[in-house]
Image (tube, helix red, strand yellow):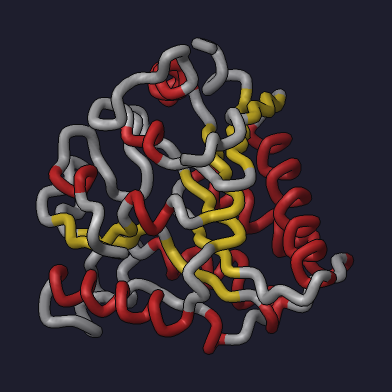
């Protein structure tokens, strides 16, 4: 069993500084992979700080060397709602980032909406099939936010989905955050990543961050963020407020 690198922690002065740093690191990562001939496969997240990061990436894009037509984008989780719902993570990512930089639409692999699948379970099965078809079996980067309760993607404390080890994506029907129905990648899928970046901002996340990075860390059933690690590296990008209990 291989020993994974210890998590690296970056603390930034403000959410704006955090977003700028992550956006710059994101562009550099894509540039390096493309220079080596790799078509990067990236797993995105939603959330307030992620929205800031996506807008900052779009601002940096024109001056970068990234070929945005040669990047595949996936999602860690999504709300199972109508395709035009404001609750869709993918809708805002498209508006703030993907549509602005010229990403090839065929390389944007959104999770199903209510228009694409009969129910949330069918949506999860469909997305697993899509990842198998469009993916290479490994993400170059998984980006994740962390909730005040320590959840990542739509893997919530105490949920049955935390113990799924034989699926890429699963349905969530009782999310403690609305809306209740979601599709999420599982631990086995999220952990097939070279790099995992946690991007966390705000004092309400500080306890979860502190418990996730404690020695020893909390149990993953209590703080699900503990269960995701990159094969080559794991970085926690924090602002001062979210890092206040380290």
> Residue 166's spot in the image, x, y percent?
23, 60
| Left or right position of 243 against 147 | right
Q: Quadrant of the C terminus?
A: top right
> Residue 9's spot in the image, x, y percent?
64, 27
Residue at 23% x, 70% y is 124
Q: Nearer the viewer, residue 12 or 124?
A: 124
Residue at 81% x, 70% y is 36
| Left or right position of 124 against 243 | left
Q: Nearer the viewer, residue 220 or 84?
A: 220
Number of marks = 0
| Left or right position of 162 against 187 | left
> Residue 226's spot in the image, x, y percent?
40, 32
Q: Nearer the viewer, residue 241 or 135?
A: 135
Location of residue 59 by image quarter: bottom right
Give the answer, above or below, for where 205 lies relative to 199.
above
Residue at 68% x, 28% y is 10
Give the answer, above or below, for where 38 lies relative to 239.
below
> Residue 193's spot in the image, x, y percent?
53, 55
Q: Residue furthest front?
A: 1
Give the answer, above or below, for where 162 lies relative to 36.
above
Residue at 20% x, 44% y is 163
| Left or right position of 137 against 160 | right
Location of residue 148 by image quarter: top left
């Amino acid at each position: 069993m291989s020993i994974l690198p210890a998590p690296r922690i970056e603390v930034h002065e403000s959410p704006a500084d955090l977003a700028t740093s992550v956006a710059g690191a994101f562009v550099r990562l894509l540039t390096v992979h493309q220079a080596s001939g790799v078509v990067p496969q990236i797993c995105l997240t939603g959330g307030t700080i992620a929205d800031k990061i996506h807008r900052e990436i779009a601002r940096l894009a024109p001056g970068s060397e990234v070929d945005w037509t040669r990047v595949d984008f996936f999602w860690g989780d999504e709300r199972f709602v109508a395709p035009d719902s404001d609750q869709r993570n993918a809708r805002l990512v498209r508006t703030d980032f993907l549509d602005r930089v010229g990403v090839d639409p065929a390389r944007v692999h959104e999770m199903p909406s209510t228009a694409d699948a009969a129910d949330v379970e069918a949506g999860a099965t469909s997305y697993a099939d899509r990842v198998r078809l469009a993916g290479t079996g490994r993400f170059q980067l998984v980006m994740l936010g962390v909730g005040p309760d320590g959840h990542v993607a739509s893997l919530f404390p105490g949920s049955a989905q935390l113990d799924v080890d034989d699926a890429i994506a699963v349905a969530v029907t009782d999310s403690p955050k609305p809306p209740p129905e979601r599709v999420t990648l599982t631990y086995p899928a999220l952990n097939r990543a070279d790099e995992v970046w946690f991007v966390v901002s705000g004092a309400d996340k500080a306890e979860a961050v502190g418990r996730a990075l404690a020695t020893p860390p909390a149990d993953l059933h209590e703080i699900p963020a503990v269960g995701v690690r990159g094969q080559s590296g794991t970085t926690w990008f924090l602002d001062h407020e979210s890092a206040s209990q380290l």
